[in-house]
Image (spheres, coloured by chain):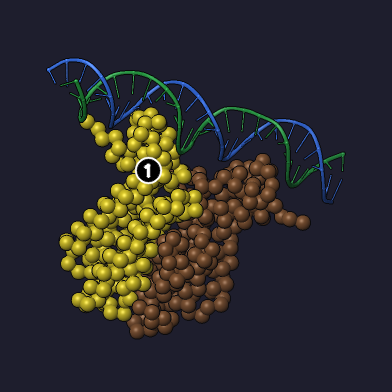
Chain colours: A yellow, B brown, C green, D blue
Amino acid sequence: MRDTRTELLLQAEILVRRGGYAGFSYADLAEAVQIRKASIHHHFRTKADLAHALVAAYDARYDAALAGILAGEPDAISRIAAYGRLYLGGVEAGLGCLCAVLAIEGEALPESLRADIARFFEKHIAWLEAVLADGIASGCVRPSVKPAASARMVVATLEGALLMERLLAGPMGFRGTLDALCAGLAPAGLSSRGDDTI
Amino acid sequence: MRDTRTELLLQAEILVRRGGYAGFSYADLAEAVQIRKASIHHHFRTKADLAHALVAAYDARYDAALAGILAGEPDAISRIAAYGRLYLGGVEAGLGCLCAVLAIEGEALPESLRADIARFFEKHIAWLEAVLADGIASGCVRPSVKPAASARMVVATLEGALLMERLLAGPMGFRGTLDALCAGLAPAGLSSRGDDTI
DNA sequence: TTCTTTCTACCAAGTAGTAGGTAGATTTTG
DNA sequence: CAAAATCTACCTACTACTTGGTAGAAAGAA
C-alpha cells in the first residue's frame, strides 16, 4: 500500500526546494510520483493548495525538532548549534530551505502563502529569542547580546549560509559559519568547538 | 533618445529580484519597457543571455561600491557597516539580492550562470576577509575573529537578513541584524551604534 | 545605401486546470 | 444478508493560455 498524498508532498518538497515554486510543474511532479498529472489535482486542487500543504508539513516538522532540541540540549549555545545543524541536512542534500525559496519568489506567490512563511520565520525568531534570554540568565551567553536582535540575526545567518554554501563550499562552509556564529554569542574566551583551521 | 538595452536591463533586474528568474517572462519585460516581446530578442538573444548580462552589470556595480567603501571608510567595522548598508536599498525597495534570487533557483538555471553567481559571492567573501584581517591587525576587530570564517558569515547574514526582513520587519529589522553583526565583530565593550532599543 | 532597431505574425512546447469516465472499495438501506 | 448508492483514486482527453524563440517585413538612422 502506498500513500499517494504523502508521496506527492515528499516529492513536491524536493522539487520546490531544488528549483523554486515557479520552477516546477505538475508535469514534473507527476513524473516523479509516477501518476498522471490530472490525478494530482484530486489530492491538491490547485498548485497554491499544494504549496500551503507543503509549508504546513515543513513547519510541523520544525516544531517537533525545536521541541526535541529544548529537551535534549542543556545550554543555549548547544541549543543554537543544534538548531543550526537542522539546516545542515539541506546543504548536504543540495536543497534550500522551503520557506526561503518561497520567500524569494514573494510577489509571484499567493498572498496567503506569504503570511504562512512570515509566521514560520517569526516562530523561529521567538524560539531563539527565548533560548538566548535563558542563556544570558544562566551565563552561557555573552550578556551584551540583545536577544531580540540576535535571534533575527541567527535565523538570517543560517538561511543565508544555506543559500550560499549550497553553491560554494557545501557542508564545510556551512559548518564554519555556524561555528563563527556560536563563537560570537558565547562569552569571550570560550570557544565551543576547537577547530583551529584558520 | 532612449537606450533600450539599458532600460531592458533595469526593468529585467527589478522583475527578477522581485519574483525570480522562472517567475518573470519576456512578455512581462516587454510590457514594462513598452516594446514588443520579439524586440527583446534583438538585444538579448535568449533569456539566459539576459540573465548573464544582468549578473555582469550587478557585479560591476558592487565592484564600484566596494572600492568606494575602502576609499571612504577608515576602519574595518565601519567598512562592514557600509557594506551591509548596500543591502539596505534592496530591503527598502522590496527587492531581493539578484544573485541570491538566482542562487535559489539553482538546478533550474543554466550551469554557466551558476558559475557567475558563485564568483560573485566568492569575490565578496575575499573582500571581507581582507577587511577583517586588516581590522584585526589595527585592533578595531576582536582578535578572536577568524577572517575566513567570519567573512563567509557576514555575507550569509546579510543575504539572509535581506531575504527575511523583506517579508517581516523591513528596514528596521535589517538594521537590527546589521548592528548585532557589527557588535559581534568589534572588541568587547565597544558598541558602534548606540541604539539601546532592546 | 546599409545597418540597426522595431514591428507583425507566427510556432511548438509547456502551463495549470477541467470534463467526464472507470474500477473498486465503503457505506447505506431495504 | 444483498442491492443500491456513494466515495476514493485514478485515468484519458481536452481546454485556454503562456512560454521562449523565429521569420521576415517595415521603419529609422548613418
The one nearer the camera, A114 or B128, is A114
In the rendered view of the protein, which quadrant contains the N terminus of chain A? top left
- What residue sits 36% from the left and 34% below the top? A42
Q: Quadrant of residue C19?
A: top left
Name the chain under label 1.
A
Determine whether B58 is above or below B24 in the image: below
Q: Position of residue B142 (x, y in %)?
A: 36, 78
- What residue sits 32% from the left and 76% below the top? A145
Determine whether B115 is above or below B163 in the image: above
Is residue B116 visible in the rendered image? The answer is no
The one nearer the camera, A43 or B140, is A43
> In the visual, does B45 lie left or right of B24?
right
Amino acid type, callout 1 = Leu
Q: Quadrant of residue B187?
A: bottom left
Q: How many marks?
A: 1
- What residue sits 31% from the left and 62% below the top? A124
> In the visual, does A81 lie left or right of D1?
right
The one nearer the camera, B108 or C22, is C22
* Residue at which label 1 appears: A50
Determine whether B27 is above or below B103 in the image: above
- What residue sits 38% from the left and 74% below the top? B180
Q: Position of residue A123 (x, y in %)?
A: 31, 61
Determine whether B74 is above or below C23 in the image: below
Callout 1 crowding tier (Cα within 10 Å): few <14, some 14–19, many ≥20: some
In the rendered view of the protein, which quadrant contains the C terminus of chain A? bottom left
Q: Secondary structure at mark 1?
A: helix
Q: Position of residue A142 (x, y in %)?
A: 28, 77
The one nearer the camera, A96 or B31, is B31
Q: Position of residue A32 (x, y in %)?
A: 36, 34
Q: Quadrant of residue A100?
A: bottom left
